[in-house]
Amino acid sequence: MLALQEAKLLALLATLPFLTLVSDVSGIIDGGAVATKLYGQPMETIIASVLRGIEAEDIAGFIKPFALITGTVLCQQCMKTYGGLSELAARR
């Protein structure tokens, strides 16, 4: 049972940077769409501005420190149940 929980924790740690990247790109595109629609700003200008502003510290921020805490708490709560996540949701 412990190996399953460790696998879930590793999966969480592996996917969180990808989810962060997807949300960042989505925010840039959506913000660009709003700026284009409301203020007439060309999308090319917005993307060029974003690319000029990105630094190494921003890219290193994809690995979130709270992922380990979140994964550990969720795995511990799931270990207390017998039915997995569906049982955990039913307990609420």
Image: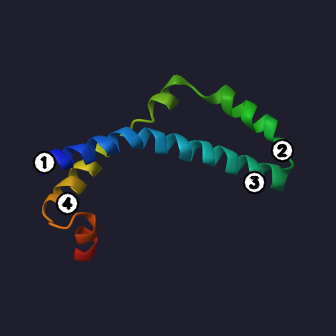
Residue tagged by mark 2? 41
Mark sitting earlier along the chain (4/3): 3
Q: Is residue 86 visible to the viewer in this orientation of the structure?
A: yes
Where is residue 18 shown, x and y percent of the image?
A: 47, 40
Spatial CA distance of label 2 from label 3 is: 9 Å
In front of the other: 22 or 43: 22
Is 53 placed left or right of 62 in the picture? right
Q: Which mark is residue 48?
A: none
Q: Residues within 10 Å of mark 3 (few under 14, many from 20)?
A: some
Image point 69% across, 46% down: which residue? 29
Spatial CA distance of label 4 from label 3 is: 41 Å
Are discs 2 and 4 less than 8 Å apart at CB? no
Residue tagged by mark 3? 34
Image point 27% across, 49% down: which residue? 71
Spatial CA distance of label 1 from label 3 is: 47 Å
Q: Residues within 10 Å of mark 2 (few under 14, many from 20)?
A: some
Residue tagged by mark 4? 78
* Amino acid type of the residue that numbered disc 2 sits on in the rendered structure: Gln
Mark sitting earlier along the chain (4/1): 1
